[in-house]
Image: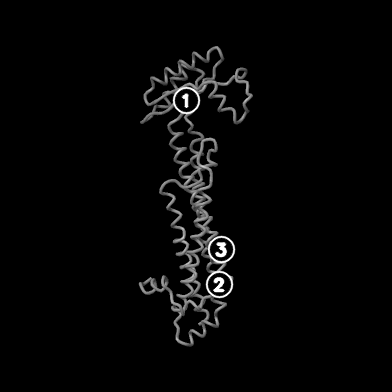
Amino acid sequence: MNLSRLRNLIVGDAQADRVVPPSGFTAQLTLFVSGAMAFLAVFALALSLASGRLADRWAEELARAATLRINAPAEQRVAQTEAALSILEQTPGVASVRALSREEQAALLTPWFGTELPLDTLPIPQLIEVIEDDPGYDAVGLRLRLQAEVPGAILDDHTRWRAPLVDAAQALRRLAWVSILLIGGATAAMITLAANAALAANSQVIEVLRLVGALDTYIAQAFIRRFTLRALLGAAVGVALGMIGVWLMPEASREGGFLTGLGFQGWSWLLPLCIPVLGALVAFAATTRAANKRLGDLA
């Protein structure tokens, strides 16, 4: 795009603008579609960023944590727990170890079994929290030593279910980006239909302009400018409403898990401001293609 066309797109031409109806079905359709799609794009972007943060947090937290279960008879459980703690404290690469109290273990089971669970009458294993240091410990060697000295100890480094959780969060992130691409494609399609409808409705005006010497580029520029500005305005309103909706959503909390924290943090609040610009570019490209094709068919 040269400077002259860019100036015409921004400033406009009063005579050329008369070719495009300032209101009516096509204007309302363009504004509504741009606003609705921008609103959805804000939430898709928020979902993508939140999924990325969730995947990073799960990968970081679970990679450094492990659980040791002491499955032993009640009379041996205390002795085996102390032996396991002694071994873990002597193991290189282990930052800290801590045996969970009965209250902490009950709190872990409460969401599934309720608060009335009789822990004293159930053979619940003793849990030990293991935090890995950098560069980490030798899991294979630690398992062999525990197997020899603490028969009831089972080390779970969360490998089996850590990867599926991270993969699920990453898949959700990719799905959000695919949704953004589909939103852009749907916006382009709807604006193309609106531009074609406006061009068809003004076919007689276009013929008169051609008779008096107007070039197709001059006529197309009027449609491109009007539809681009409509898309920019509609997308700006949609983004504003979407950001308000995201801001009103609950903040991240451990109680809510991944159901909370769907929003922007820090500098990411600036990312939705790019959506109106991208919407205007999509409208510009779609209207340019539709105008050139339609004017070529009317020639």
The x, y position of residue 39, in whole percent, is: 53, 56
- Residue, x 49% and y 84% (percent of image)? 209
Q: Where is residue 195? Give x, y as percent.
A: 53, 71
Which residue is painted at 50% across and 40% down in the image?
252
Quick one: 244 or 210, which is closer to the camera? 244
When asked about the image quadrant of residue 281, the answer is bottom left
- Decide: few, some or many residues near mark 1? Use Cα within 10 Å; few <14, some 14-19, many ≥20: some
Q: Amino acid at mark 1?
A: Glu
Q: Earlier in the sequence, mark 3 or mark 1?
A: 3
Is 250 above or below relative to 63? below
Q: Secondary structure at mark 3?
A: helix
Q: Tell me what residue is drawn at x 54 percent, y 66 percent.
A: 30
**To which residue does mark 2 refer?**
23
Which numbered disc, 2 or 1, marks the residue that appears first in the sequence?
2
Type of amino acid at the residue the image marks with label 2: Ser
**Residue shown at 44%/26% (left/top)?**
130
Give SS at disc 1.
strand
Check disc 3: other Cα within 10 Å, few if <14, some if 14-19, many if 20+.
some
Q: Quadrant of residue 74?
A: top right
Mark 3 or 2 closer to N-term?
Answer: 2
Distance between the alpha carbons at the discs numbered 2 and 1: 66 Å
* Real-space CA distance between mark 3 and mark 2, rounded to the nearest whole angstrom: 13 Å
- Does 198 sit above or below residue 185? below
Camera-nearest residue between 146 and 182: 182
* Image coords of residue 4 (percent x, y): 37, 74
Kindly indicate whether the residue at mark 1 contacts the one at mark 3 (C-beta within 8 angstroms). no
**Between marks 3 and 1, how big is the CA–CA gap?**
54 Å
Say whether marks 3 and 2 touch (CB < 8 Å): no
Q: Which mark is residue 32?
A: 3
Mark 1 highlights which residue? 129
